[in-house]
Image: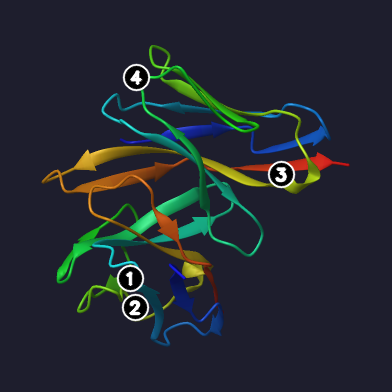
Amino acid sequence: QQQVKQSPQSLIVQKGGIPIINCAYENTAFDYFPWYQQFPGKGPALLIAIRPDVSEKKEGRFTISFNKSAKQFSLHIMDSQPGDSATYFCAASIMISSGSARQLTFGSGTQLTVLP
Amino acid sequence: EAQVTQNPRYLITVTGKKLTVTCSQNMNHEYMSWYRQDPGLGLRQIYYSMNVEVTDKGDVPEGYKVSRKEKRNFPLILESPSPNQTSLYFCASRLAGAREQYFGPGTRLTVT
């Protein structure tokens, strides 16, 4: 079964702190690992993504760390701000059937609150 | 502006009354899909479509129908809604084979 397990379910940090959200997957055929950010009343939006041949990817204050052997990846938010308060979803993607489509499996989400 | 639109955004209905949630994208994307989002469960895929007249079941298709008669539209149909279909629904689209997926703003459905 294609599963992506995400933790913690909720996270509260002070402004400037470094929240870390963790995800683990089972299927080694996943070949793309995006993180989505969702604000209340909005759809998820792609934040940052990584491929399994890379151990780390950084975009601005957001960093993905990827551990292929452990089948785990995590999102770090440096110098977190109240505006980062949102729900974060990890996901894993795999090419399916005929090779012309991709299936995306989501984690259960982490509600992040950054206190001012 | 490139976007995915959904209508309605909020809907309250009663058990058994057929309803349709529309989804439209203006990016000429081949691939479209529907998800439901429930607390603690993340987003689960209901149905997806790889192109016009090509649809397939996702992880939780029971109680839902879809159609893809035009490339830009992918409506979600609940023939006989039940309270366990109360949820937040998202439509998404992307180019075939592309990794990035674009989500609509969501439709909050309540079935009483």
Measured Cα–Cα span from mark 4 to mark 1: 38 Å
Name the residue type under label 3. Asp
Measured Cα–Cα span from mark 1 to mark 3: 35 Å
Residue hosting label 3: A84
Q: Residues within 10 Å of mark 2 (few under 14, many from 20)?
A: some
Figure quadrant of the N terminus of chain A? top left
Residue at 47% of width from left, 68% of height from top?
Answer: B85
Residue B64's mark? 1
Q: Nearer the viewer, residue B30 or B39?
A: B30
Q: Are marks 4 and 1 on the same chain?
A: no
Name the residue type under label 1. Tyr
Which of the chains bears the disc numbered 2?
Answer: B
Measured Cα–Cα span from mark 2 to mark 3: 35 Å
Name the residue type under label 4. Asp
The furthest residue to the bottom: B17
Q: Are marks 2 and 1 on the same chain?
A: yes
Residue A114's spot in the image, x, y percent?
Answer: 79, 40
The furthest residue to the left: A98
Measured Cα–Cα span from mark 2 to mark 1: 6 Å
The furthest residue to the top: A69
Residue A55's spot in the image, x, y percent?
Answer: 45, 17
Q: Quadrant of residue B108?
A: bottom right
